[in-house]
């Protein structure tokens, strides 16, 4: 995380965050000031007008007090007016996308995010953007309602199936920011988080060049290794031989795999391919059916590369298999 951090708000990572915070603080401190005035007056009146002696002393009736009445009409009116105009300007800033914004397609599905960049490649769970450039997000969901929420950007928008929602932001400084799903979307909702990585202009173009790369000059295995990390397979399939959210892959190729339901399957090229495209078809015993499908997110030669890589993975400790 970067930039300023206030006492209880997350750091300010977008161009509109400081204004959102300023309005929040205005409302907060106006409320605090009124609270203080009302409390102090209450205490003073309780003491000053307390009952003294046995005989009740009644407050003499009085009629209106013009100055006081105008005061309690116009002071709140001005304050509410300030909040309205300020809030409306902020609302417009959040909703009117600058014309020169670059567009990134955001796709939400149970339970991950995928981002498609202007050059046609995609990333999973990490949105990478250039600093100091407006970014327009064209978002849709493959299944249920999700919500794209970046607290540092003071930005949250629902992502719906069957329609696009649009949001934008500009992050002035390089740095990493949390991305959450802010709409309960099922069992994996709490796992549906990622990050927004803001890169400097040069780092961003280098990154685009690297990501648009489709394996030229690399062996299929090497390219598969590159994809295994960039498509975030590695978050669930650990390479140290331990089981993560998904089964450990090193050394598994060519073995019989025990499935949920009691049957077994030979871990071969077809089983790997099927598990990438239809992960729920044959779930390994002891694991939850939580892997998302990569149907439509991987090109044929990318699947070939991943298969080649998984095939090549050896158990970390050569202990005879
Ligand atoms: Cu997606 Cu909660």
Image: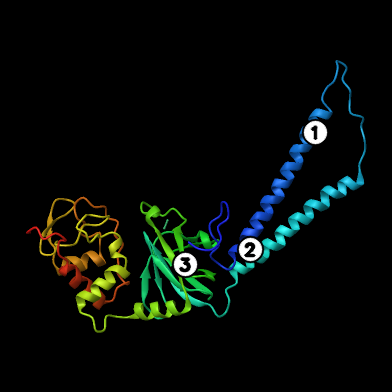
Q: Quadrant of ligand 1?
A: bottom left
Question: What residue is drawn where x is 39% and y is 58%?
Answer: 192
Q: Nearer the viewer, mark 2 or mark 3?
A: 3
Display coloring: rainbow
Tell me residue 233's x, y (percent): 28, 64
Mark 3 or mark 1, which is nearer the start of the sequence? 1
Quadrant location of the C terminus in the rendered image = bottom left
Tell me residue 124's x, y (percent): 36, 67
Distance from label 1 to label 2 (Cα)?
37 Å
Label 2 SS: helix
Front-most of 288 and 31? 31
Q: Nearer the viewer, mark 1 or mark 3?
A: 3
What label sits on residue 263 in the rendered view?
Answer: none
Distance from label 2 to label 3 (Cα)?
20 Å
Residue 234 in sight: yes
Question: What residue is drawn where x is 81% and y is 32%?
Answer: 45
What label sits on residue 175 in the rendered view?
Answer: 3
Specify the farthest residue to the top. Answer: 54
Label 1 SS: helix
Tell me residue 228's x, y (percent): 27, 68
Mark 3 or mark 2, which is nearer the start of the sequence? 2
Question: What residue is drawn where x is 88% and y is 17%?
Answer: 55
Label 3 SS: strand
Crowdedness near tag 2: few (<14), some (14–19) or many (≥20) residues, C-alpha within 10 Å? some
Question: Which residue is disc 1 drawn over?
Answer: 44
Crowdedness near tag 3: few (<14), some (14–19) or many (≥20) residues, C-alpha within 10 Å? some
> In which quarter of the view is residue 51 placed?
top right
Tell me residue 239's x, y (percent): 22, 61
What label sits on residue 19 in the rendered view?
Answer: 2
Front-most of 270 and 194? 194
């Amino acid at each position: 995380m970067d930039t300023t951090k206030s006492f209880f708000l997350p750091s300010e990572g977008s161009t509109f965050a400081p204004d959102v915070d300023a309005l929040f603080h205005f409302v907060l401190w106006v409320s605090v000031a009124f609270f203080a005035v009302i409390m102090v007056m209450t205490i003073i009146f309780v003491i000053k007008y307390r009952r003294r002696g046995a005989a009740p002393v009644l407050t003499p009736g009085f009629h209106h007090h013009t100055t006081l009445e105008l005061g309690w009409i116009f002071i709140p009116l001005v304050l509410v007016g300030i909040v309205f105009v300020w809030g409306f300007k902020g609302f417009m800033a959040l909703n009117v996308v600058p014309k020169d914004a670059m567009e990134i397609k955001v796709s939400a599905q149970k339970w991950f995010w995928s981002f498609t960049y202007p050059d046609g490649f995609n990333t999973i769970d990490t949105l990478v953007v250039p600093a100091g450039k407006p970014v327009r997000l064209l978002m849709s969901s493959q299944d249920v309602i999700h919500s794209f929420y970046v607290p540092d950007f003071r930005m949250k928008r629902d992502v719906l199936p069957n329609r696009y929602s649009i949001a934008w932001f500009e992050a002035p400084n390089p740095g990493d920011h949390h991305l959450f799903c802010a709409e309960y979307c099922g069992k994996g909702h709490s796992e549906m988080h990622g990050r927004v990585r803001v890169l400097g202009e040069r780092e961003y173009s280098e990154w685009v060049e690297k990501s648009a790369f489709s394996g030229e000059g690399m062996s299929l295995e090497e390219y598969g290794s590159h994809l295994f990390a960039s498509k975030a397979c590695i978050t669930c399939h650990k390479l140290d031989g331990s089981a993560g959210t998904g089964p450990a892959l090193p050394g598994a190729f060519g073995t019989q795999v025990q499935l949920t339901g009691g049957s077994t399957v030979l871990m071969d090229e077809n089983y790997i391919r099927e598990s990438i495209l239809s992960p729920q078809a044959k779930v390994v015993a002891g694991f939850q059916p939580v892997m998302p499908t990569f149907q439509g997110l991987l090109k044929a030669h990318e699947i070939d590369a991943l298969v080649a890589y998984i095939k090549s993975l050896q158990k970390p400790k050569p202990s005879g298999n």
